[in-house]
Image (cartoon, rainbow, N blue to C red):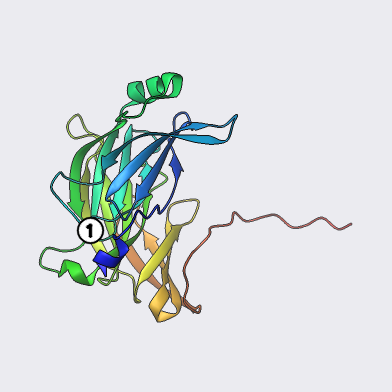
Amino acid sequence: AQQERQADPHAHAVILDKYYGRVAFVPDLGMDTIRHFRYSPEQGRLEPAGMVKSGPDGRRALGPRYIEFHPELPFAYVVNELSSEVSVFEFDRAVAEDLIEHGGSDRQTLRLVQTVKTIPEGYPGQHNTCGRITVHVSGDFVLVSNRGHDSIAVFRAERGPVNTGYLTCTGIHHTRGATPRHFQLDSTGEWLVSANQDSDKICVFHMDLSTGFLEFTGNEYAVPSPNFVCNVPPRGPVAAA
């Protein structure tokens, strides 16, 4: 199955950098690369600006699916769907600024600094693929869903004087259903809804904001093959005409 999915280029998303909104990143699941583009909002044009491997050199069948930026630190996190890993990249703002100003075809704005597994040691990697990755609104945690192991891995994003932006796993929590294709935190970052696609239900968890622990609330709802969860801010009552 992995060979079929990586037979050709497979752009899985496009994300703009969080600082300038002028560098676009495209995870290419088929080629194990993160493609860079210089984005012109005035012309609506993308100019190729190079690429970087989504994991360590010499590795294959990584399958980069999505990239998320830290809200405060100059780091980006790439979920590798096929290898069940998160790659941590440092974002070079100086290179990005030069790329935006002058262009170029081989500009490396991302530098790989760490790769971590999303599933427990000993679990067969061929039985799992990653789904979603998100950075918690606080910037303290990075969360990834595992389809096969049926869990959400929670990592703490370090902020100390050493290894800032690096990830440390705090726990891997079962989603109370099969194939968590997607999950979503509410605006407070305290409540998480998991879309368990192959169990036809969504499940609600409470997140401890100090430890990252996910506790099942006991609330679950039947939804046919849920693929996506969208958090909509509450609105006040509509005034009478």
Horizontally, is 35 left or right of 44 in the view?
A: left
Q: Is residue 210 visible?
A: no
x and y percentages locating residue 22 in the rendered image: 47, 31
| Residue closer to the observer: 129 or 120 | 129
- Point out the image quarter for the C terminus: bottom right
In this orientation, which residue lies closer to the viewer: 59 or 19?
59
Q: Is residue 24 above or below residue 81?
A: above
Disc 1 secondary structure class? loop
Q: Within 10 Å of the Cα at label 1, are there few (<14), some (14-19), or many (20+) other Cα atoms?
A: many
User: What residue is disc 1 on?
Assistant: 118
Any part of residue 128 in sight: yes
* Farthest-out residue, front: 8
Q: Position of residue 5 (x, y in %)?
A: 31, 63
Question: Against 203, is 132 above or below?
Answer: above
Going by the numbered disc 1, the residue's amino acid type is Thr
Front-most of residues 93 and 206: 93
Instruction: Tell me which residue sits at (58%, 57%) in the image.
Output: 232
> What residue sits 37% from the left and 55% below the top?
10
> Going by the image, does 1 lie left or right of 204?
left
Q: Quadrant of residue 92?
A: top left
Among the 4 quarters of the image, the one containing residue 74: top left
Q: What residue sits 47% from the left and 51% below the top? A: 188
Q: Which quarter of the figure is the N terminus placed in?
A: bottom left
Q: Is residue 121 left or right of residue 51?
A: left
Residue 134 lies, with reference to residue 178, above or below; the image says: above
Which quadrant of the structure image shows residue 109? Answer: top left
